[in-house]
Image: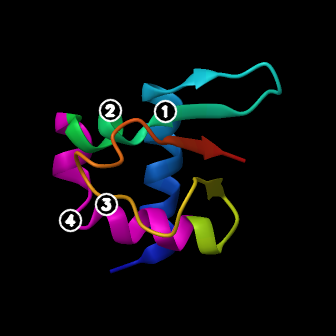
Amino acid sequence: MDVAHEVALLTEEIQRLGSKNADGTTSVKFGVLFNDEKCANLFEALVGTLKAAKRRKIITFDGELLLQGVHDNVDVILL
């Protein structure tokens, strides 16, 4: 699995599904990302891709790990 490629795809999906914030960043709720059909088909392990992107400082979100249902309202912010 090519992590850099997965992170690039994640960036595109956040831009597609998200909205611009006043500070110029783009954000999307984790639940929107997780429940999107295209994302479900693209990412075998969305949570792992999110963690890899966070480690590379491409995105940010509160907490260490996002879980479906519990964290649906957490913003995933593209930096």
Front residue of 21 and 9: 21
The quadrant of the image that shows the N terminus is bottom left
Amino acid type at circle 3 is Leu
| Residue on which disc 2 sits | 32
Q: State which tag comes first along the sequence, 3 or 1.
A: 1
Q: How far apart in space, not on screen, are marks 3 and 2 (Cα)?
A: 12 Å
Q: Residues within 10 Å of mark 1 (few under 14, many from 20)?
A: many
Horizontally, residue 11 falls left or right of residue 56, namely: left
Is residue 34 in the magenta section? no
Number of numbered discs overlaid on the protein picture: 4
Crowd band around label 2 with a 10 angstrom C-alpha radius: few (<14), some (14–19), many (20+): some
Residue 34 point in image, percent of width and height: 27, 44
Distance from label 4 to label 2 (Cα)?
16 Å
For the residue labelled by badge 1, is the local secondary structure a helix, a strand or a loop?
Answer: strand
Residue pointed to by mark 4: 44
Q: CA distance from mark 4 to mark 1?
A: 19 Å
Q: Are marks 4 and 3 in contact (CB under 8 Å)?
A: no
Q: Nearer the viewer, mark 4 or mark 2?
A: 2
Disc 3: CA contacts within 10 A as few (<14), some (14-19) or many (>=20): some
| Quarter of the view holding residue 22 | top right
Magenta-tinted stretch = 37-53
**In the rendered image of this protein, does residue 2 appear above or below residue 54?**
below
Q: Main secondary structure of the magenta part?
A: helix
Question: Dot 1 corresponds to which residue?
Answer: 28
Task: Determine the residue positioned at 24% across, 51% down.
Answer: 68
**Label ID, residue 46:** 3
Q: CA distance from mark 3 to mark 1?
A: 14 Å
Query: Residue 43 lies in magenta, yes or no?
Result: yes
Circle 3 sits in a helix, a strand or a loop, which is it? helix
Marked residue nearer the N-terminal end (4 or 1): 1
In percent of the image, x 58 and y 53: which residue is there? 61
Q: Amino acid at mark 1?
A: Val
